[in-house]
């Protein structure tokens, strides 16, 4: 959490704490090694890597958060309706999910961004189209078991509407696995966004992005490894921290684990 908070604060306050302009070009200083004035060195255009890294955190983290919010909301709504109503509603919605799952996720995102154009909004749209299906299947499975509980049957017998039952009785009891899934999904989205930017399909050219910084550094990997090393290190630290946080959340929100601790 400390590492994640560090990068989040760095991205939020990047315009104020960046030591240099991330768009500044100084060709006479290109590929300069780390120094006191430029702690992480300079890239191919002579831009300060630390400044671009901080501004790149804004893109990677905001894309990860927005995609998970959109895909989690869509997937949760679809999973609720599919699991609760069953029948033809379940069949139609799950066949759509199966069709999307038949495509390799990242390949589908690459195809969508290639058609729509390399923009951050298009990346968010493509990754949302790719990501909501996992939430839908997870929520559907949880709803199938929860909707048969006694409190749901009692609410139905008292005349409560389907929307009220789903909102007040089913949704709160399926949120724990959704929160865990969302945490892991943020890490996956950050890697996917970096992959698209690495291929030139992410943020517009020149925009500070961890994936594009990696792509720039691959040309001079042997001559100036620091150009690729630091954005790669940032991706690794953020993704690893989010995955560790997701593991901890899964243990904390697991009802069987909570019951075991209570018995002990």
Image (tube, rainbow, N blue to C red):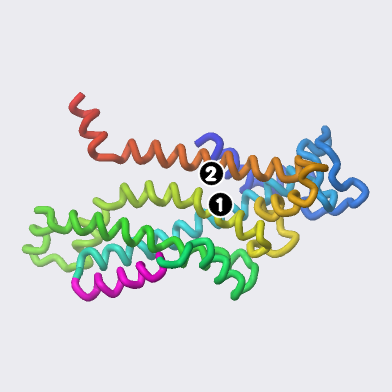
Residue of label 1? 191
Percent from the top left, x then y, of residue 162? 19, 67
- Residue at image coords 44%, 39%: 245
Residue 253, placed above or below residue 159: above
- Residue at image coords 36%, 58%: 135
Locate residue 117 relative to residue 242 in the image: left or right.
right
Residue 62, placed above or below residue 246: below
Percent from the top left, x then y, of residue 96? 35, 72
- Residue at image coords 59%, 69%: 113
Q: Which residues are magenta?
A: 87-101
In front: 85, or 232? 232
Q: Is residue 171 magenta?
A: no
Residue 129's tag is: none
Q: Furthest-top residue in view?
A: 264
Percent from the top left, x then y, of residue 2? 53, 34
What is the secondary structure assignment of the residue under circle 2? Answer: helix
Residue 239's tag is: 2
């Amino acid at each position: 959490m400390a590492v994640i908070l560090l990068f989040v604060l760095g991205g939020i306050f990047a315009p104020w704490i960046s030591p240099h302009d991330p768009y500044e070009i100084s060709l006479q200083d290109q590929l300069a090694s780390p120094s006191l004035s430029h702690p992480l060195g300079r890239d191919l255009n002579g831009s300060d890597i630390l400044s671009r890294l901080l501004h790149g955190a804004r893109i990677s983290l905001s894309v990860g958060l927005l995609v998970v919010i959109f895909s989690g909301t869509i997937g949760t709504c679809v999973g609720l309706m599919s699991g609760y109503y069953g029948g033809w509603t379940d069949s139609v919605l799950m066949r759509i999910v199966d069709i999307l799952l038949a495509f390799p996720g990242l390949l589908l995102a690459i195809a969508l961004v290639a058609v729509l154009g390399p923009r951050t909004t298009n990346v968010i749209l493509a990754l949302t189209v790719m990501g909501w299906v996992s939430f839908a299947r997870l929520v559907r499975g949880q709803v199938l078991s929860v909707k048969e509980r006694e409190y749901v049957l009692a609410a139905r017998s008292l005349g409560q509407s389907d929307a009220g039952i789903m909102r007040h009785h089913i949704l709160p009891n399926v949120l724990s696995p959704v929160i865990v899934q969302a945490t892991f999904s943020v890490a996956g989205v950050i890697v996917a966004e970096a992959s698209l930017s690495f291929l030139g399909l992410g943020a517009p050219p020149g925009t500070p992005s961890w994936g594009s910084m990696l792509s720039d550094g691959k040309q001079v990997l042997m001559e100036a490894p620091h150009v690729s090393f630091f954005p790669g290190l940032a991706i690794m630290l953020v993704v690893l921290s989010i995955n560790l946080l997701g593991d901890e959340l899964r243990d904390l929100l697991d009802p069987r684990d909570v019951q075991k601790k209570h018995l002990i």
